[in-house]
Amino acid sequence: MVTNTQTNPTAVQGCLDDLGTPLHDVTFVIVDLETAGGRPGAQGITEIGAVKVRGGEVLGEFATLVDPGCAIPPQIQRLTGITTAMVHDAPKLASVLPAFFEFLGPDAVLVAHNAPFDVGFLTAAARDLEVPWPAPAVVDTVKLARALVPRDEVRNHRLGTLAAHFGASVNPNHRALADAQATVDVLHALLSRAGSLGVTSREELLSFSAKVPAARRRKATLADGLPAEPGVYVFENEDGKPLYVGTSGNLRTRVRSYFTASEKRREMGLMVDLAARVTPIPCATALEAHVREIRLIAEHRPRFNRRSSRPEKIAWLKITDEKFPRLSVVREQRADEATYLGPFRTMVAARLARDAVHDVRRIRQCTTPIRAKGGTACVLAEMDRCDAPCIGGITQRDYLDLVSRLRQELLNEPGSIVNDVEARLARLAGQERFEEARAGRDALIELLRGLDRHQRRAPIVNNPHLMAARPRRGGGWEFAVIRHGRLAASGASRPGQDPRLTIEALRATAEAVATPPAHRSAALEEETEVLLRWIARAGTRIVETDAPWVSPRDAATRYLDDLDPVVRRAHEAAAVESRLLAHPGQGRATTRQSSSPRSNPASRSRWE
């Protein structure tokens, strides 16, 4: 039997400022089953009772006896009052179950007292009868009660005890509908208590029953007043020192999640315990939030941030500025006349790249400065792998010509180095020196990765002004002003708004960025990499630029496609994204000057 006390409920439109789905907008279906005992399955259910509520109002009830297909044991008859004769003419579960699932609906939260029992019977019956299980979200009022009602307040958490404690309007009597009605009142009482601990949404309720310390739940008030918009959030201790920096498209939603069971990281629990306040930094775009996060982590080194907290781990391959230059691995770029290649993800990667060059080019490897003739040749000269400038084996002019050719190869034409390395690897393989060949291949890949990063970043680090735009979901555009690899401004235009107004405002208010030494970024390398990935995504358009966007014709990326499966997969994914997201008929960007031999710069993760 199904009765509807509200045949046409009024739809309520949730507010975007709310956290998730507010509890007053959530539809709950409170269910109770009576069974003939035994194991869960298509046989055994004798009665189903359910009440549908939303916002404290009853929307409908579902109640029916069910023929279990077996005799009801005497002890069950005495407990429930349901006899075998009563269910003799009742419908079979095969017809009742689909009707109940229809009553449940697609979005309701299923509630039961000791939910594993009821849900276990329902899922087993659905499996046996081959009826699709709707897989609703489930709330167990027993678990809620154990978390919210201490044992010094009630002797146990049985339904009858809780119903009496909270003054339920219906006394549970082991009949399905009456027990479900009593559970409705118990649920509302428990939700009232949970609300005092900051549980105000469907999402928070579903995670509430897990074990989260009460002290941590009480700190959910730190999220009060935070804006529901994109930005950066900073957890701070009592002294105002940042503990953790993060970003989110909805600051209030993300910060509140730290005080629920959805946050399972042990170190984040410790961080929340130490936190005294949360400082929000609203941002115009997600890109701006990402960049601000990088800068704040680099500046404050928060204790609980691991990612991005060690920018000094990167390394560079340096062609030194000496009388007889050599290749050196360094941690940072200095304001000198040397040539820096990279960045490489680690010192080890940079050393492997240097080894790959040393294997096929006769540049010196000794670190002792060469001041005059008369030195002692090293073993590399004896092996004819170096022209030995240390003993006058080559003039300075000829040596500088050799270094100049090497610099050109590394910057713009790595093909000849790749060919020479691969020829060496083939010789090693032919001699069955497979381990050496594999190590040489790995070194070549690291070299090409570093050269590829250098080539991809050059168009923005060498550009004094670049403005790009991306379409936003729902309409409008987001813009970024990039100067020498640093985000100088970010903004967005609303749907239907003339984007030229935003462009003019950003151009006028963007940060003035001093010109860094040649080929150096004015920002942290991670920030530059984030900006480059943003530009490289399908759909991004160059609005204006002070320098052309160019890449070497013999770019390192073409060789990585063949050698590095990680890069090949990334390129394939970028190509798919371009096909799916391209909008060829959606406007045209205005550019001062732009040229590139590739339609879309390589779009890859920070360190492949």
Image (cartoon, helix red, strand yellow):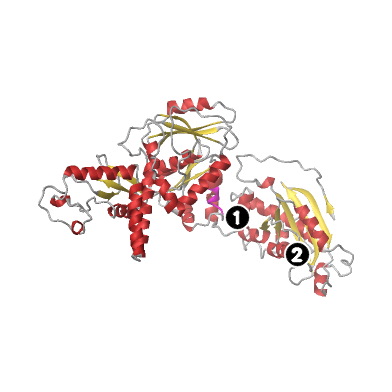
Q: Which residue is drawn at 30% across and 44% down?
A: 340
Magenta residues, start to end? 255-260
On the image, the x and y values in percent for residue 474 come to 60, 36
* Side of 234 relative to 249 (left or right): left
Q: Residue at x 37, y 31 (%)?
A: 464
Q: Which of marks 1 and 2 is in front?
A: 2
Quickly name the residue at label 2. Answer: 125
Q: Which amino acid does label 2 sit on?
A: Ala
Residue 379 visible in the shown view: yes
On the image, the x and y values in percent for residue 124 come to 73, 65
On the image, the x and y values in percent for residue 405 come to 27, 43
Q: Does the magenta stretch include residue 531?
A: no
* Side of 606 relative to 515 (left or right): right
Quickly name the residue at label 1. Answer: 207
SS at mark 2? helix
On the image, the x and y values in percent for residue 265 come to 50, 57
Q: What is the CA distance from the residue labelled 1 to the residue labelled 2? A: 27 Å
Contact check, label 1 and label 2, Cβ < 8 Å? no
Q: Which amino acid does label 1 sit on?
A: Ser
Compared to 452, does 213 lie above or below?
below
